[in-house]
Each structure stands twice: as C-alpha cells, then as structure tokens.
Amino acid sequence: MLVTTTEQIPGKNYEVLGEVFGVTTQSRNVVSDFGAGIKNIVGGEIKGYTRMLQTSREKALSRMVAEAKDKGADAVVMMRFDSGSIGGDMQSVVAYGTAVRFVD
C-alpha cells in the first residue's frame, strides 16, 4: 500500500474513505531504564529508547495500514506521526492519515 505524507499523488485521482489510525504504547524494562539512567549522567544516545521508538513507529504504521486495507483503501495520504509520554516510562506513538481509493 502506498503511504505518503503529501496530499496529492501525482497522476492519480481518488476518493476519500476517511481517517485511519494506528496506535501503540510501549515501555522499557527495568534493566533498560537503569542503563538509560547511567547515560543520562554521562550523556550520549540511549539506544534502548531509540529502538523502542523505532519499533513503536513501525507498529503504529503497520496498524494504520491494516485499518486502511479494512476500509478498501489503495493508499494513505497526509500520513503523520505523533507521540507523547505517559507517566515517566511509557511512550505512545500514533500514525494517522487519510485512506483513499483510486478511481481510475
């Protein structure tokens, strides 16, 4: 399925089917949190959290595409990500966009 951040798909006409979303909430384990605490003191990338966010984006995107397929979509336009913290140790990521079906 084509997923794009643009509003128009060059050379394609389509009808709008509606909004689609994919959401996931992830948390790190105690060992990763301990490692992150050490990194917070000495500085540098916290690779465990980077992996968690990367995995979260992939899951959210996959769930959004599945919802679009369920609606009979050929593509998702205007796709965006949003994220936020829940408590001190959880991260929520949402992928959202507009599901469309090609008309010619």
Image (cartoon, rainbow, N blue to C red):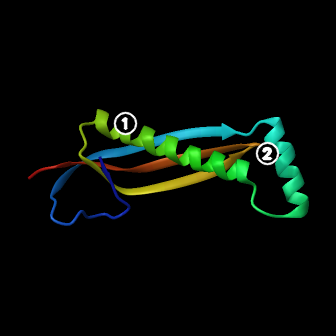
Tell me if 5 is positioned left or right of 72 in this view. Answer: right
Q: Residue at x 25, y 42 (%)?
A: 73
Labelled pair 2, 1 in contact (Cβ < 8 Å): no
Distance CA(mark 2)–CA(mark 1): 30 Å
SS of the residue under disc 1: helix
Q: Which residue is drawn at 37% across and 36% down?
A: 66
Quick check: 69 above or below 10? above
Quick check: 62 above or below 11? above
Q: Residue at x 44, y 38 (%)?
A: 63
Residue 90 location, x and y as percent? 71, 42
- Give the residue number, with chain letter if any, for mark 1: 66
In the rendering, which numbered label is found on residue 88?
2
**Kind of residue sitting beneath label 2:** Gly
In the rendering, which numbered label is found on residue 8?
none
Point out the tag, 2 or 1, that comes first from the N-terminus: 1
**Kind of residue sitting beneath label 1:** Ala
Q: Which of marks 2 and 1 is in front?
A: 1
Q: Residue at x 86, y 58 (%)?
A: 40
SS of the residue under disc 2: loop
Tell me if 87 is positioned left or right of 52 in this view. Answer: right
